Amino acid sequence: MAFTLFGIPVSRGIAIGRAVVLSSRSHDIDHYFIDAGQEQQELQRLLRARDAVLEELQTLRTQMPKDTPAEVAAILDVHIMMLHDSMLTDGIQHWIEERHYNAEWALDTQLKTLTRQFEKMEDEYLRERRADLEQIANLLQNALTGQKYGNQPACAALGASEAGTDPLIMVAHDISPADMLHFKQSVFTGFITDVGGKTSHSAIVARSLGIPALVGSRYASRLIRQDDWIVIDGDAGVVLVDPTPLLLEEYQFRQRQFSIESEKLNRLRHTPAITLDSQDIEILANIEQPQDAVKANEAAVAGIGLFRTEFLFMNRTGSQQQMPDEQEQYLAYKTALEAMPDKPVVIRTIDIGADKPLDYGENNHALNPALGLRAIRWSLSEPDIFLVQLRALLRAAVHGQLHILIPMLTHTWQIRQTLTLLERAREALNSEGIPYGNAKIGAMIEVPAAALILPTFLRYFDFLSVGTNDLIQYTLAIDRADESVAHLFDPLHPAVLRLLADTIAQSHAAGKAVSVCGEMAGDTTMTRLLLGLGLRSFSMHPSQILAVKKEILHSDTQQLAPLAQKVLQAEDTEQLNDAMQALHNA
Ligand code: PEP
Ligand code: MG
């Protein structure tokens, strides 16, 4: 049956494909204590579920088409073997008998226990079996709640979707930013999540993939079924499920139009970003992984404006020893710098916390993680780990024009501590005779408190970069990852614009470089406003560069400046809309 869902559009374009539904099991697993004396009954329930999954897998194994890749058969064999293994069922039995957990809860607990054990294994092959374990636990959970194997996400994981060669669209309750990174190499042509806001980190990574995406779609992962045909309209924020042939045709037409437009934009790749009144605009790239710098260089950017290094620390296994060591970090930063010869590369120190938790540590459990031990707060609370990063950065600085950027600074003492640690890292390298290079040091302006004491920041730092995602979040008290308050996330709120405009103006007056690296910089509806406010350096995901450049090429900053002031002075929505309209028409 055809129906429509709405969400928050985070990446433009039209995607048409079959749904691959990944439900996040832990959100809807039942947790309750069974009555004493019910243990055997509960255990039997689990064993029946196991037998049902075994039967399904064995049937799938024997009925596999001849041309199925050997790896798929091998994965099925591993899953069948694991289901026979007593380490899973004995453990679950323990939780049921000793703790009186219901079967689903016991299974989930045993999965977590085994996952921890797998993580500690030296052998990489065995460590990687953790994913298989999670997949079979997922199958067991589904069997316990009476779902059939044909509806399982594991089909997708095995590459055995019924969809065959049809394009695939991922539908999930949530996808962590770290998992989203895996999709850079994947087959998905679009994705939809139930939760998240426009500037949640998952959305940001999705945008970097350049595929149509929608977040905050509330019940999508429950309402859309495996292999349903769906259309994502990434401009309108709409998902059409099971569309009529007429609608499908209409969207296929729009999809072709979109690729023609993208082709046209491609011609701007090597055009310098200069406004009609001859202002040179610096376009920089935001990246998450060192190798992204190579692609960014192909996009003819002026440099890297934001390398979010926390992604190097994510998706790793559970103890601090597994964090990237100095050498690994040094090589990662060196890769980024060497990919950008003679161009600035801004590398931000780790910004974990909030919607980018590490797999370990307390920040996972904070009640208000966005206000908790995040970014520089975390780094200063872990000086040994921070020093490793600073040493790696300073060592990498010999390979290019390194700029080190510090996230979420708020207090003057944090600035001093950070600079002291930097000095300590230099001294240590000196005394060990290890070569290191010069780097400019900059601060992110992400907290209103920082924008309000900007002269202090300008005194200490070589450059500033405005993180509008967080500046908006913290100015308006809106959790940027929470779809239920997404409608309140407003880059045009007068308080946000005032902080932004003052930061740009004061930086220029002090002769210091200032850039915007939040999502606002890559939003074409904001380009003219930012130019009018005096911004000359924009950092964004490479997928947004050409569209922003097109806006720049058609803009006259002298004409835009007074119009931008009108936007700043707007007293109500009507005045604001009129002022924005005037900017766009200029
Ligand atoms: C920002 O806050 O605008 C920013 C660029 O940092 P992040 O999105 O990584 O928090
Ligand atoms: Mg930020």
Image (spheres, rainbow, N blue to C red):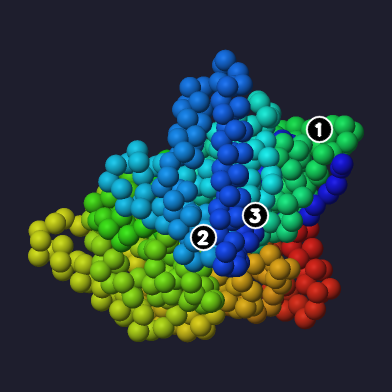
Q: Earlier in the sequence, mark 1 or mark 2?
A: 2
Q: Which residue is labeled 1 in the image?
A: 253
Q: Nearer the viewer, residue 356 or 59?
A: 59
Residue type, label 3: His
Circles 1 and 2: CB atoms closer than 8 Å:
no
The image shows residue 74, relative to residue 547, as above or below, that is above
Q: Which residue is labeled 2 in the image?
A: 96
Q: Which residue is labeled 3 in the image?
A: 173
Secondary structure of the residue carrying tag 3 is loop
Circles 2 and 3: CB atoms closer than 8 Å:
no
Horizontal and vertical percent position of residue 150: 67, 36
Secondary structure of the residue carrying tag 1 is helix
Determine the image quadrant of residue 48: top right
- Comparing marks 3 and 1, which lies closer to the viewer? 3
Determine the image quadrant of residue 477: bottom right
Answer with left or right where residue 434 lies relative to residue 132: left
Which mark is on residue 119?
Answer: none
Answer few, some or many: residues within 10 Å of disc 2's Cα (few below 14, many 20 plus, some between 14 and 19). many
Horizontal and vertical percent position of residue 224: 75, 46
- Comparing marks 2 and 3, which lies closer to the viewer? 2
Give the Cα separation between the discs numbered 1 and 2: 56 Å
